[in-house]
Image (tube, rainbow, N blue to C red):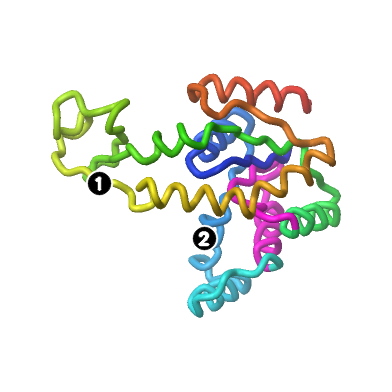
Amino acid sequence: MNLILLGPPGAGKGTQAKRLEQSHGLVQLATGDMLRAATARGSELGLKVKAIMDSGQLVPDGVIIDMIAERIARPDCRNGFILDGFPRTVPQAEALDEMLAERRQTLDHVILMQVDEAALIDRLAGRFSCKNCGASYHERYHRPQAEGVCDLCGGCEFVHRPDDRPEAVEARFEVYRRQTAPILPYYRDRGILRTVDGMGEIDEVARQIEAIVASAK
């Protein structure tokens, strides 16, 4: 089974992809992680990617498609994969379809995690974590039990991710709206776009996704 998880930053795509990995033996393919892994392996493709990244240029779509093709050919992807973070544009979606067709594969579902943007910005902007152990907290919804002390490790230093600040989150949403949202009609026209309520509790969102996955079997 081959899936794509779509949604704006912070919608929970990575969390749900991990659950699908565990429950269905699928492999999560996050392109950012794949780029770093490819350069670390030092393969011919990895060296090509490294040279492009070292020069400060964006990795071309064709190279990313080649990287995905190389990755899904490995034995651990025999049950399928979950793409997280790709495609972001219609040309990328078209190139992905062409590559899969050449391999006699196809996408089963494209799952959109739909969210309330204002509520999600509020959720993301309030996040902070323990500098020592990484435990996550929120300014309003989940503060440490003892003010200024991590519940898990007792650490007293906390950090906010720079890209979780309100202005940064809004900028990331704008990029999503401009680049990624236009691919939704592309997959809707193909009849494989499914939507879940991404604002629910993690278990509820997982239940919705499981129902979609079960319908493909």
Q: Position of residue 37 (x, y in %)?
A: 52, 60
Q: Position of residue 206 (x, y in %)?
A: 57, 25
Q: Looking at this view, is 134 or 138 the one in front?
A: 138
Of the image marks 1 and 2, the number of the one nearer the N terminus: 2
**Residues rendered magenta in the picture:** 63-90
Left or right: where 127 falls relative to 45: left
Q: What secondary structure is marked by label 2? A: helix
Q: Is residue 97 magenta?
A: no
Please determine whether, in this image, residue 159 is positioned above or below residue 62.
above
Q: Residue at x 85, y 52 (%)?
A: 101
Q: Looking at this view, is 100 or 13 the one in front?
A: 13
Give the distance between the C-alpha atoms of the residues marked 1 and 2, in whole angstroms. Answer: 27 Å
Q: Quadrant of residue 78?
A: top right
Which labelled disc corresponds to residue 37? 2
Q: Nearer the viewer, mark 1 or mark 2?
A: 1
Q: Looking at this view, is 136 or 20 the one in front?
A: 136
Q: Position of residue 46 (x, y in %)?
A: 57, 70
Q: Say what amino acid the circle numbered 2 marks.
A: Ala
Please determine whether, in this image, residue 118 is positioned above or below residue 163.
above
Please determine whether, in this image, residue 5 is positioned above or below residue 47.
above
Q: Residue at x 82, y 47 (%)?
A: 105
For disc 1, the marked residue is 159
Q: Say what amino acid the circle numbered 1 marks.
A: Val
